[in-house]
Image: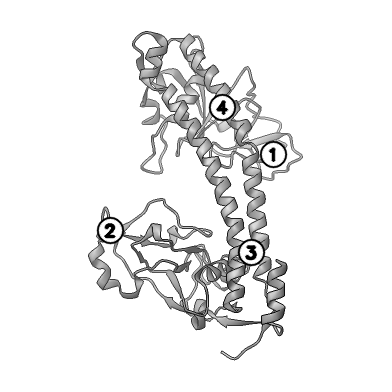
């Protein structure tokens, strides 16, 4: 940080020029691709939904034939391009790395191709800052969804210090981003290790080896009772952390907030656990404390007979299931409950549960600190990124 300040004092004693993006980049619009032309392979089509907060999503990737490149002109992306979303969540940016190429640029996504006056990574960090996102959201028009014009993007001004200063800023900011990426990779590796061990243990072959006999398959619906959540739905979303009862969802958010509702509380406990499942996504959670739910999307699963079917064992089977709903519709009754899973005798089920509980506790103890450390590194990255890019302005003629 001090080195950058010294460089600014030496090279920019009167401030840093702020230039329009059109003066330091080539601003390129996307091509209108028809969905009927998508193919199984070829060049990836970068759409609005692909451009997330600083990265490119890998979900629902679409491709167009490579031979189409001659028709799309400048909408063929290159390594080190920076792309910006122009519709919906406007102002999101992502960096084009070699791993996603070849790729085409779809409509309503802008490409900024750096000139010799600006480093691509510096350009990316400037636009990934809070200021650009805030300005883009303010400039977006439209009531149903925001739209950002190419004209506005081209005219947007950013600080453009000498290349030596850009290079030093990129080095510092990238170093923090790399630390965060390393921690995230470590966390994912530990999760993958646990999932692999769990799935191996719950395989039919492994269970039959433990049981010393053939293990039969049963439908989930034959072993699990489900309850509609109507009487447990929270009456108000006026949450407050001082209230006693958590309001849950089976998804990633899990605890949405806390309510002071005193009626309609599901009285789960260590001795009376329940599995909460999202009827649309099949995401599920093990719950052993009193709670309420947010909506009717949740279903409550319990064992039909704990002397035959351990709920904890069935929960682990639910965790390893690879079923992915193809449509936004309720899944439990018609589909998910019909899935067949291996069910050994109860003693073997309990043995599996004991092993996985211990392994889960060990994995949790190893990974507990990582999310907090990742968040600390992310805050550190954002602090230095936004601080280093808040450069004193020098007005210059365009």
* Helix, strand or loop status at disc 4: helix
Distance Cα–Cα, label 3 vs label 1 = 35 Å
Residue lying at 45% horizontally and 30% vertically, measured from the top left = 196
Instruction: Classify 10 Å Cα crowding around label 2: few (below 14), some (14-19), many (20 and above).
Output: some
Q: Earlier in the sequence, mark 3 or mark 2?
A: 2
Front residue of 185 and 208: 185
Circle 2 is placed at which residue position?
42
Distance Cα–Cα, label 4 vs label 3 = 37 Å
Circle 4 is placed at which residue position?
360
Distance Cα–Cα, label 2 vs label 4 = 41 Å
Q: How is the image coloured?
A: one colour
Instruction: Classify 10 Å Cα crowding around label 4: few (below 14), some (14-19), many (20 and above).
Output: some
Distance Cα–Cα, label 3 vs label 2 = 35 Å
Look at the numbered discs 4 and 3 and tell me whether their residues touch, using CB distance below 8 Å. Answer: no
Residue lying at 36% horizontally and 19% vertically, measured from the top left = 204
Mark drawn on residue 385: 3
Residue 249 visible somewhere in the drawing: yes
Q: Position of residue 354 (x, y in %)?
A: 55, 17
Residue 7, image quadrant: bottom right
Q: Earlier in the sequence, mark 3 or mark 1?
A: 1
Q: Earlier in the sequence, mark 1 or mark 2?
A: 2
State the residue lying farthest toward the right: 242
Residue 308 visible somewhere in the drawing: no
């Amino acid at each position: 940080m001090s080195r950058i300040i010294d460089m600014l004092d030496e090279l920019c004693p009167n401030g840093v020029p702020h230039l329009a993006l059109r003066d330091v980049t080539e601003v390129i619009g996307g091509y209108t691709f028809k969905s009927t032309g998508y193919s199984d392979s070829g060049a990836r089509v970068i759409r609005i939904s692909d451009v997330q907060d600083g990265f490119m999503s890998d979900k629902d990737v679409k491709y167009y034939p490579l031979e189409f490149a001659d028709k799309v002109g400048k909408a063929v992306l290159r390594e080190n391009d920076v792309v910006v979303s122009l519709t919906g969540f406007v102002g999101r940016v992502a960096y084009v790395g070699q791993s996603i190429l070849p790729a085409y640029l779809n409509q309503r996504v802008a490409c900024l191709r750096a000139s010799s006056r600006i480093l691509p990574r510096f350009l990316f960090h400037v636009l990934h800052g809070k200021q650009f996102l805030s300005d883009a959201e303010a400039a977006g028009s439209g009531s149903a969804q925001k739209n950002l014009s190419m004209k506005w993007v081209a005219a947007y001004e950013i600080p453009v210090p000498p290349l030596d200063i850009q290079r030093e800023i990129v080095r510092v900011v990238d170093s923090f981003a790399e630390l965060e990426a390393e921690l995230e990779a470590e966390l994912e590796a530990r999760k993958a290790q646990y999932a692999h061990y769990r799935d191996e243990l719950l395989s039919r072959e492994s269970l039959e080896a433990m049981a010393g006999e053939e293990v039969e398959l049963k439908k989930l619906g034959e072993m699990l009772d489900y309850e509609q959540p109507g009487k447990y739905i929270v009456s108000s979303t006026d949450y407050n952390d001082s209230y006693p009862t958590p309001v849950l969802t089976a998804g990633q958010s899990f605890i949405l907030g806390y309510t002071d509702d005193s009626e309609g509380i599901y009285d789960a406990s260590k001795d009376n656990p329940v599995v909460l499942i999202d009827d649309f996504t099949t995401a599920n959670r093990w719950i052993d404390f009193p709670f309420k739910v947010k909506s009717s999307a949740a279903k409550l699963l319990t064992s039909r007979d704990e002397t035959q079917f351990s709920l904890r064992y069935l929960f682990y089977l639910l965790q390893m299931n690879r079923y992915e709903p193809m449509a936004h519709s309720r899944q439990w009754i018609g589909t998910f409950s019909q899935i067949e899973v291996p069910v050994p005798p109860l003693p073997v089920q309990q043995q599996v549960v004991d092993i996985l509980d211990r392994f889960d506790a060990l994995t949790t103890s190893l990974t507990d600190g990582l999310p907090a450390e990742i968040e600390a590194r992310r805050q550190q990255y954002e602090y230095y990124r936004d601080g280093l890019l808040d450069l004193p302005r020098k007005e210059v003629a365009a």
